[in-house]
Image: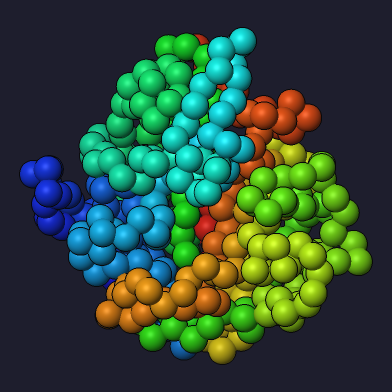
Amino acid sequence: MTAGVSRAPFGTLPSGEAVEIVTLRSEGIEARVLTFGATLQALIVPDRAGALADILLGHDDLAGYVDHRGFFGATIGRYANRIAKGRFELDGTSHHVEPNDGANALHGGAEGFDQKVWHIAATGGAADPFVTLTRTSPDGEGGFPGTLDVSVTYRLRAGELEIAFEAGSDRATIVNLTNHAFFNLGGAAEPTDILSHRIRIAAETYLPIDAGSIPEGGPTPVAGTPFDLREPQAIGARLRETHPQILRGRGYDHNYCLDGGVADAPRLAARVEDAQTGRAMELWTDQPGLQFYSGNFLNGTVAGKNGRAYRMGDAFCLEPQFYPDTPNRPDFPSARLDAGAIYRHRSLYKFSTI
């Protein structure tokens, strides 16, 4: 494929706002990004025979993303994951984010960054094409304090996708951004389940959750549990065990506390391999936590690409981020962003074959 960047219309929202799709092409990899939700709409990589396929679940048209808030490939903010009861206190002031996951706020609450149209601030690159999207989240949007200027840059290199977030605020706030791609290394066109994919996560501990998927207690050793993924194993190997946390999450939907915590530069957090196609993906990140989700709540009610109904186990998610409910847990790494400071998050998705 020829390296470069191109732009095209992708549809119009009911509000009349136009949405674009930006296509990035580099050596052996292609990414497509929507301005709606700063969404990674497609990621095309080769298998061991060199055959290209899109490995992301999602939708073929704008209506799919608008009508079904499934977070497929979206940029998540202002706060990825859950905040208990949608409430937190900052500098003595209480803030409320409208709950949208039972009693809790999930992925920014009732209306997050995934539902906003972003601005294309820059594109470029030859061998390393990129697009930078920006938006300004006004003070009080979604219940979060501070006017937040935020950007996300998608950049391709040979066999690699980098996603880099930055944000700055005019007053103290909380920020936790991530991408919510649903991966199937076998290909998204006619996906087989991902239960035979082998996964390794570089974490000695994870966070058990309560019935509302809020962390209870602190980091807990993975040793001796189905959450021990320090050595590669099939995602489905222990997915049907009666461990109380597997039952509570209907599978894996838990934060792993990555070895080393907040890092100065991305380090290896996870590796996933699909023996059938030979595709392998490594996730490198500077974030302290990684939410591993095994697609437990895909229930066949949403039709995705090629009109296919997505079902349990059709994809997995690896979401690098701060821990869930950090604003209410002073014992967790802090997601606080002070006025004038810069929030940064870099994650690399490296593709190869086995």
Vertical relation: 176 (above or below) 180:
above
Using the rendered view, name the quadrant where residue 199 is placed. bottom right
Given residues 44 and 195, the one toward you in this image is 195
Q: Is residue 103 left or right of residue 287?
A: left
Vertical relation: 157 (above or below) 87:
below
Residue at the image position 26 percent from the left and 64 percent from the top = 64
Vertical relation: 102 (above or below) 283:
above
Q: Is residue 42 left or right of residue 280?
A: left
Q: Residue furthest left?
A: 16
- Residue 184 in view in this figure: no
Coordinates of residue 81 in the picture (x, y in percent): 56, 45
Residue at the image position 70 percent from the left and 63 percent from the top = 248
Residue at the image position 54 percent from the left and 25 percent from the top = 174
Vertical relation: 96 (above or below) 226:
above
Q: Is residue 207 left or right of residue 156?
A: right
Coordinates of residue 172 in the picture (x, y in percent): 52, 14
- Residue 39 in view in this figure: yes
Q: Quadrant of the C terminus?
A: bottom right
Q: Is residue 346 left or right of residue 168?
A: right
Q: Residue furthest right?
A: 224
Coordinates of residue 20 in the picture (x, y in percent): 18, 51
